[in-house]
Structure formats: structure tokens, C-alpha cells
Amino acid sequence: MPKRRVHVAAAAIYNDQGQVLIARRPSIADQGGLWEFPGGKLEVYETGREALKRELKEELGIEIEHAQPLIRVHYEYPDKFILLDVWEVRQFSGEPYGCEGQAVRWVDIDGLSRYPFPPANGPIVKAVGLPHAYVITDEIDDDEAFVSTLTHALENCNGLLVQLRAKSLSAERYLERAHKALELCRAHGARLVLNGAPELLNEVDADGIHLTSKALMSAQERTVPADKWLSASTHNKEQLDQAARLGCDFVTLSPLRDTPSHPDAVTIGWHDFQQMVEYAAMPVFGLGGTTLDDIDQARAVGAQGVASIRSFLPD
Ligand SMILES: Nc1nc2c([nH]c(=O)n2[C@@H]2O[C@H](COP(=O)(O)OP(=O)(O)OP(=O)(O)O)[C@@H](O)[C@H]2O)c(=O)[nH]1
Ligand SMILES: [Mg+2]
């Protein structure tokens, strides 16, 4: 018998302290005893958004006022194919409680990975912990100019994710700059990944490592610890597959648009970008000709957000 296809709408619900609500599945249910993001199956006549609204009313007694797409995860269970259509909810009325007798709990995002979730939930937990805006630093030789440019970006955008990309610097200067960038990021509540070899994390306690697509394709296994992020640059499905094999936590996918930095690259465009994001098994940031103004559009087609070099530079 062919496997069933199940489409589920679920929510990452945030409170004002930045915590997320999770619920425990009743022990008799499918995946019983595991924690989940509240939600449930779509009725035949419903859109994902409508199902989300109904399920959160039924399961938690809350009324959603605004929901934005977070991530869509395809996963094959032994008995079914599942599509988890996950939404970010920050505005709702009512105080959530377990209307069906299930335990519910507000948890800090950093503590989410300690809870046992169903196997399909890995990418959701990653997406919940990631910002939507990702700045890639420009090649700047002068240290003072670097500091003022990064400070400008950090002050203009809350909770940024920053990638330190400085290919023209010597190894020694890259490390010095990484320490400085980490200090600035920590002071502004931003996260930092280093574009380079995983061993850099032995020297600098940054949040993770970003691999170029070339480094991604030649890597045999993940050598970045589980409590640090591994990300990579991707441009096609083959690279997305390798990122999944390696256990990347997220990727950039480029070039979304024409970009002066890579004039010969074949532009992906929004249509193919959406298909590739749907195919990817992890959060994806659109890159290439993108600005912060593209975040909502990128999220509407299922991406985590947007990465950019230029749009964070001072005018
Ligand atoms: N709600 C929810 N379901 C999940 C998550 N992860 C995951 O694999 N699932 C799977 O999605 C499927 C649908 O979930 P559900 O049991 O909540 O559906 P429902 O609320 O409509 O309940 P019902 O079947 O009693 O009518 C289950 O097979 C469940 O194991 C998650 O984070 N949240
Ligand atoms: Mg449910």
C-alpha cells in the first residue's frame, strides 16, 4: 500500500521574553511522549494558515493575530510522508494552556535542543534559533574601517547573524579580526560564524563555521561540534544534498538575483529559488543582489531570510 501523505500546520509561538512554547504529545498518540510544536493536520478544505488558526484554538485556547511562514519540512516516516508547514507566531490573544490535557512549556531557545522531538523536527529547531537577517562582511583591509562598518550594521539591525569573510587577510590578521568581530557581536546580541576551517573554533569561541561551496564539496564529514553551527554556500541541488549529508545547520543559496560581485554566475530567480528551498532539508538564506527589504518575500517562499554584503554597508 502506498504511504499516506500528511500535511501538518504547526507553530513556533514566542512570548515577550523570546521563549518558545512547546507541548508534549499524549503518550497514546503517534510519537507519544515526545515534545512538539503545537498544531495538527489540515482538513481537506483548509489552507495551512486556516488549519493553524483552528488547531491553536483547539489545542491551546489562543487566537492567532499574525503568523509568518518559518519553514516547511518534508520527512518520510515508516508509515507516511509528512509535510510540516511551520509558522512563526508572535501576536496572539489569550493565555495558552493544554486544552487537551497535554503538558505545555515556555522554553528558552538555547534550551530547545535538550527536549526530545520527533525525528522530522531537526530543521525546525534550527530555524527557530536563527535570525532572519544575515550580514556577510565585505573585504575591508583597514581595521578601523572594518569596526565602524560592522558596528553600523549591528546598530541598524537587531539580532543579526554575521559571517566574517575576509579572504584577503593573512591567517594571523583573520584571527585578530575574528576576536574583534566576536566582541562586537556579543555586545550587540548578534551571532558570528567564521568563513574558514573548522579548526578556527579552537582559537575563537564563535557560534560556528561557514564553508565555501568548494570546501563543502570536498568535506568528508562534519568536524564542527553539535553545539556550534555549520553552514555552507550552495548554488544548486547537488550542493544542497552534500550540505544535508554533512549535517549543515543552514545554508546560503545564491545568486538569487544578478549581482555585480559574480557577473558570470547564472541567476536563480524567485521561481527556482522557491523550488530549491522547498527541496532543501535545512533553513536557507537567499543571497545575491538581495537587501533587507527582501526578507518578507524570501520568507513568503519558505526561506529563513536574506543574506547580504552590500545592503548593510553605510550609505
Ligand atoms: N503538531 C505537530 N506534529 C508533528 C510535529 N513533528 C512531527 O513529526 N509531527 C507529526 O505530525 C503528525 C500530525 O500531528 P497531530 O497528531 O498533531 O495531528 P492532529 O492535531 O490533527 O491530531 P489528530 O490526529 O488526533 O486529529 C503526527 O504524525 C506527528 O507525529 C510537531 O512538531 N508538531
Ligand atoms: Mg496536534
Image (cartoon, rainbow, N blue to C red):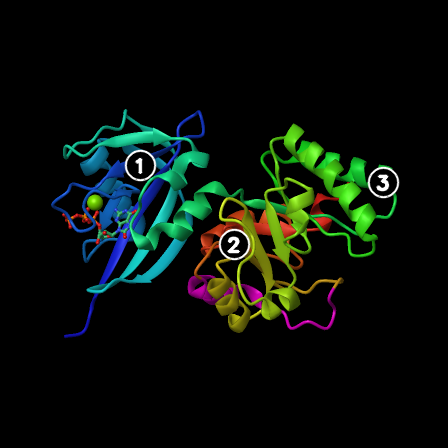
SS for callout 1? strand
Q: Which stretch did the figure color magenta?
A: 262-280
Q: Amino acid at mark 2?
A: Phe
Question: What residue is shown with label 3?
Answer: 143
Question: In this orientation, does residue 315 appear?
Answer: no
Q: Residues within 10 Å of mark 1 (few under 14, many from 20)?
A: many
Question: What residue is shown with label 1?
Answer: 22
Question: In this orientation, does residue 59 appear?
Answer: yes
Is 149 on the left or on the right of 70, as rendered? right
Q: Amino acid at mark 1?
A: Ile
Residue 91 falls in image quadrant: top left
Is 46 drawn above or below residue 36 in the view shown? below
Q: Residue at x 44, y 25 (%)?
A: 17
Whether the residues at callouts 2 and 1 have beta carbons within 8 Å, the answer is no
Picture coordinates of residue 128, whole percent (x, y): 44, 42
Q: Nearer the viewer, residue 197 or 137?
A: 197
Question: What residue is shown with label 2?
Answer: 250
